[in-house]
Amino acid sequence: MIVRPHKVFLINKNFIEFSFNESAEDIIPNFSKFKSLNSAEQFYLADRYNWDDGALVLQWIIDSPKCDKGTACKIFWSAEPDYYFDYTENTIDESEKDIWLLLQSILKRFHSNNFKTNKFQFIPSQEGYKTSWSIKLDIWKIPKELKNGIKGKKPFSFGL
């Protein structure tokens, strides 16, 4: 998969570097520009996203019909989900709720097998993520496929 230079520029300008703008608190990422991204470009965005900018754009990726299983797997493990395992929606701190909801969205899509593609590889254990914990809450049942990772092509090369 190739991410073309003009798309790299669009992603960097609108979804990554936008937060470096002096008036970043007034800037909201543009959903119509997001909708123009294909699944490889979504993976690129997820791979480079600044988590300090919140979960909105990541939630857009997970909610997108173009979202690949490998992309969702990458986002899930990048969120360091073990931090959230002791919480429910009612007990999580409000400042952490957007990530908690994002993780639950990913689990829901995996449980319902609601991804059209699984082209992109993301194997959490190969990326250094621990994938086994003692989990007490049923809402955190992690599907085997999400734990083991998604086999596929290395996500992208850049047409730079």
Image (cartoon, helix red, strand yellow):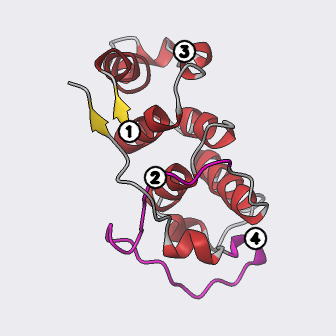
Return the x and y of residue 66 as percentages of the image width and height: 62, 37
Disc 3 residue type? Lys
Classify mark 1: helix, strand or loop.
loop
Label 2 sits on residue: 120
Label 1 sits on residue: 1
Look at the image and say whether residue 87 sits in the magenta stretch.
Answer: no
The residue nearer to you, when weighing 9 against 57, is 9
The magenta segment is 116-141
Label 3 sits on residue: 33
| Earlier residue among tags 4 and 2 | 2
Return the x and y of residue 150 as percentages of the image width and height: 50, 64
Classify mark 2: helix, strand or loop.
loop
| Earlier residue among tags 2 and 3 | 3
Q: Is residue 104 left or right of residue 47?
A: right
Asked which quadrant contains residue 17, the reply is: top left
- Classified by dominant secondary structure, the portion drawn in magenta counts as loop
Return the x and y of residue 100 as percentages of the image width and height: 64, 55
Q: Is residue 75 left or right of residue 92?
A: left
> The N terminus lies in which quarter of the figure?
top left
Return the x and y of residue 62 as percentages of the image width and height: 63, 43
